[in-house]
Image (spheres, rainbow, N blue to C red):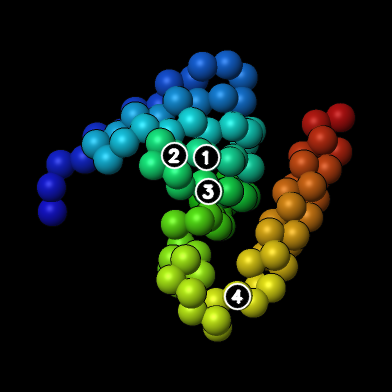
């Protein structure tokens, strides 16, 4: 176990610059959905359910993506596409519920 450092700097509404011991990244989004682009080519989409502490993250640094890069044929399924579509739908539903509750 070692020391870790992490700092988020809010650049503009919906834009964060993230600093850490392992590198930097930029996140774009809003409460409940963020898309993060790392300096080393990592991309990650995170869908959170505000107030619950629950979230789901998918990105190109996952074990499945690493298997695809290595050429494992079993990793080329459409599972990732289905998950991305479900994440987008869940994000839209969460946004609609949030907007309906704010009126």
Mark 1 neighbour density, 10 Å: few (under 14) some (14–19) many (20 or more): many
> Is the residue 21 above or below the residue 92 in the image?
above
Residue 77: x and y in percent read 64, 77
Residue 78: x and y in percent read 69, 73
Dot 4 and dot 3 residues touching (CB under 8 Å)? no
What is the secondary structure assignment of the residue under circle 1?
A: strand
> Is the residue 78 above or below the residue 23 in the image?
below
Quarter of the image where one finds residue 63: bottom left
- Residue occupying image coordinates x 45% and y 25%: 17
Quarter of the image where one finds residue 22: top left
The circle on residue 73 is none
Between circles 2 and 1, the one closer to the viewer is: 2
Dot 3 and dot 2 residues touching (CB under 8 Å)? yes
The circle on residue 76 is 4
Of mark 4 and mark 3, the one earlier in the sequence is 3
How far is mark 2 from mark 1, CA to CA? 6 Å
- Residue occupying image coordinates x 82% and y 35%: 99
How far is mark 3 from mark 1, CA to CA? 5 Å
- Residue occupying image coordinates x 79% and y 47%: 92
Of mark 3 and mark 2, the one earlier in the sequence is 2
How far is mark 4 from mark 2, CA to CA? 24 Å
Dot 2 and dot 1 residues touching (CB under 8 Å)? yes
How far is mark 3 from mark 2, CA to CA? 8 Å
Mark 2 neighbour density, 10 Å: few (under 14) some (14–19) many (20 or more): some
Comparing 12 with 95, the one in front is 12
The circle on residue 36 is 1
How far is mark 4 from mark 1, CA to CA? 23 Å
Of mark 4 and mark 2, the one earlier in the sequence is 2
Mark 3 neighbour density, 10 Å: few (under 14) some (14–19) many (20 or more): some
Between circles 4 and 3, the one closer to the viewer is: 4
Dot 3 and dot 1 residues touching (CB under 8 Å)? yes
| Residue denoted by label 3 | 44
């Amino acid at each position: 176990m070692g020391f870790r450092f992490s700092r988020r700097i809010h650049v503009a509404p919906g834009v964060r610059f993230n600093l850490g011991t392992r590198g930097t990244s930029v996140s774009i989004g809003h409460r409940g959905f963020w898309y993060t682009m790392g300096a080393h080519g990592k991309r990650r989409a995170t869908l959170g359910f505000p107030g619950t502490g629950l979230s789901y993250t998918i990105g190109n640094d996952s074990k499945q993506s690493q298997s695809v890069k290595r050429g494992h044929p079993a990793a080329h399924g459409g599972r990732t596409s289905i998950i991305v579509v479900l994440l987008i739908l869940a994000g839209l539903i969460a946004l609609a519920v949030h907007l309906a509750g704010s009126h």
